[in-house]
Amino acid sequence: MGTAVVIGANRGIGLGFARQYLEEGYEVIATYRDESKLDAETTLSDGNKESLAHLKRVYGKKITLYKLEITDTEAVSKFAKTIEKIDLLILNAGIKGYPISGTRPLDHTLEHLSNSLKVNTQAPDNIVRSFYPILTKSPNACVIYMSSLVGRTADNESGGYHPYRIAKAASNALIWNWSIELMLDWKKRNPQNLTNTPCAVAICPGWVRTDMGGQSARLSITESVSAMRKVIDYVRKTKKSNGLYMHDGSVAEKYPVTDVLKEVFEAKAKQKVDLATVLKDIVSKKW
Ligand SMILES: NC(=O)c1ccc[n+]([C@@H]2O[C@H](COP(=O)([O-])OP(=O)(O)OC[C@H]3O[C@@H](n4cnc5c(N)ncnc54)[C@H](OP(=O)(O)O)[C@@H]3O)[C@@H](O)[C@H]2O)c1
């Protein structure tokens, strides 16, 4: 089926991704930070709890658990070198970054902003950089970043949440940049096979019941992850990575179609024509 690397998979949305991709038949490489928390359960949906330790017991060799602090650049580089094959790289680990004492900019220090950028933006950047050699050799591989609608400048009516908002906004630009980069690299190496280019996309999971989202949130982890898996499939097939997606497939922010993306779309369209021609040939031979 494929290999999915889920960064920050011991609880919350990351655990939901690990479980659903295992159920789908993927091999999953799941990262965590603290082995003493591997047994801790997350409620994925009503009456449905899960833990990484339980997934390991059920799925055995289909899941590899890897201890990783994402801000440790050397550890990330070492981790990337252990991966031989990749289809999905899910950049899920993240923090709110603002203090519990308040969400307004004056409640924050420069350290809050700096820490949020370190975990939510710089670390994902470094992870993609470390995986770059394998991503560029993996047809249809996709990097998925767990973003947030609050990183969309046009949606900012309330202010506040400064460290989180700014880090997610920067990461949206970052992921789009990596997508262009991956496609340009692929084009150089595989000019005749643009339709299989790897790409990267940012998706907002919606407001989800996790430690971060709180228990009043609208969606269960299962609902959010099931919906996002469809978006991921869609983006991998169409290569329409030029936007910030919502979990339900709506596009919260659209980016222009760059030259390389235009070429990819043209190659995709041609592929459809070619397929039609092949079908016509087969039908005309009355097979
Ligand atoms: N929940 C929502 O409503 C919502 C909405 C929009 C976007 N998101 C985004 O979705 C992603 C997952 O959110 P969630 O709600 O599932 O959060 P969560 O329940 O708080 O889980 C966060 C995950 O990130 C890991 N993590 C944090 N800092 C890390 C670090 N420095 N190194 C390695 N792992 C680290 C945590 O590991 P530990 O257990 O070791 O701390 C945990 O596995 C985040 O990027 C978040 O910004 C969530």
Image: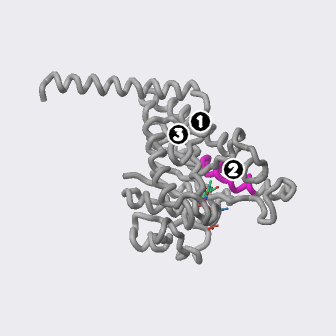
> Disc 3 marks which amino acid?
Cys
> Disc 1 marks which amino acid?
Glu
Q: Residues in magenta?
A: 116-130
Question: For mark 1, what is the residue?
Answer: 181
Q: Does the closest atom of ligand 1 sit within 8 Å of the Cβ of label 2?
A: no
Q: CA distance from mark 2 to mark 3?
A: 18 Å
Q: Earlier in the sequence, mark 1 or mark 2?
A: 2
Q: Badge 2: few (under 14), some or many (20 or more) residues near its Cα, within 10 Å?
A: many
Residue visible at 52% across and 60% down in the picture: 221
Question: For mark 3, what is the residue?
Answer: 199
**CB atoms of marks 1 and 3 within 8 Å:** no
Q: Secondary structure at mark 2?
A: helix
Question: For mark 2, what is the residue?
Answer: 121
Quick check: 267 above or below 102?
Answer: above
The image quadrant that residue 200 belongs to is top right
Q: Earlier in the sequence, mark 2 or mark 3?
A: 2
Q: Badge 3: few (under 14), some or many (20 or more) residues near its Cα, within 10 Å?
A: many
Q: Which of 135/2 is in front? A: 2
Rendered-image quarter of ligand 1: bottom right
Q: Secondary structure at mark 1?
A: helix
169 lies left or right of 128: right
Residue 230 percent across, percent down from the top left: 44, 47
